[in-house]
Amino acid sequence: MLKAIGNATASISNMPIGVVIRDGRPEEVEAITRVNVQAWRESYTGLVPDELLAGIFEERKSVRERFFEARDPTARLLVVEAADQIVGFAEGGACRQEELGTEAEIYAIYLLDEAKRQGIGRQLMASLFEHLRAKRFASAGLFVLVSNTPARRFYEALGGTPGPERTLDVKGIPLSEVAYRFDLGVQEGDPSAGTARRSLKSCRNEGVTGSRVCREGRRVGRHATSPRPWRNLTQPRTDGAPAYEKFFRSDTPLQADRLRHV
């Protein structure tokens, strides 16, 4: 049984004055990437070899660009803005890593050191959890470096339950990670709960990779048997099937994007 999230629906009125959490925009990709790179260097120096932190701007920028290009209706990218500058961000959506054992996944969360220990990270996670809950995901998870003690304490303070560990090979360098899982509070009796995981499993059984997959397992996009506009796929259906989609992309996220912190 997963632990419940602490105060995941807390009002952002507790935020420091002048700090806001809002949706990120495609034109902010470079600013978001700069935060990503700086946050890595502030948090991972001494935890990972220096070569993993060098020359990563273009790679990180490409990851963020693909997020906006995908237009996944289950996913959301939130930024933290202070004094008209982005100082942090988080993104999440349908789970891409089956070993997490959750329906949703926190793809990334990063804050600059100057924005930490002010309650901003908690509010950022609360906002993302609320989005995932609204999409009817019952649980969320993420992987974090085993050696990243501050991040692990943060996730545990939010009610995260440690899960299995694994070792990844990132550019020839082994990195040990541990999963954290969160209960989003969606009632088990809700007929829409659990739909994401079931459909993802069925799509994998069909061998669908690198394509858009709707919740009842029907292929769309370039693999569609009967192309139809994206907007129509989010409209109410008459056959009882869920109305919204998610993505399963075999090539994302990049391994390096699994290094997360707060």
Image: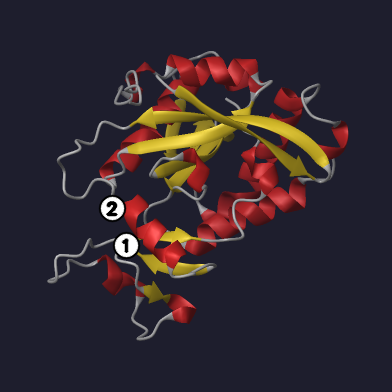
Q: Are marks 2 and 1 in contact (CB under 8 Å)?
A: yes
Q: Residue furthest front?
A: 205
Residue drawn at x 76%, y 29% as measured from the top left = 41
Q: Of helix, strand and loop, which one carries label 2?
A: helix
Check the image and report above or below for 93 versus 175: below
What residue is pinned by disc 2?
195
Residue drawn at x 46%, y 35% as measured from the top left = 141
Residue drawn at x 66%, y 49% as measured from the top left = 30
Q: Is residue 53 visible?
A: no
Horizontal and vertical percent position of residue 123: 41, 25
Split into 4 quadrants, where in the image is the N terminus? Answer: top left
Check the image and report above or below for 45 versus 249: above
Instruction: Check disc 2: other Cα within 10 Å, few if <14, some if 14-19, many if 20+.
Output: some
Q: Residue furthest bottom?
A: 226
Split into 4 quadrants, where in the image is the C terminus? Answer: top right
**Amino acid type of the residue tagged 1 in the rendering:** Arg
Horizontal and vertical percent position of residue 34: 69, 40
Q: Which mark is residue 215?
A: 1
Question: Quadrant location of residue 189?
Answer: top left
Horizontal and vertical percent position of residue 11: 30, 23
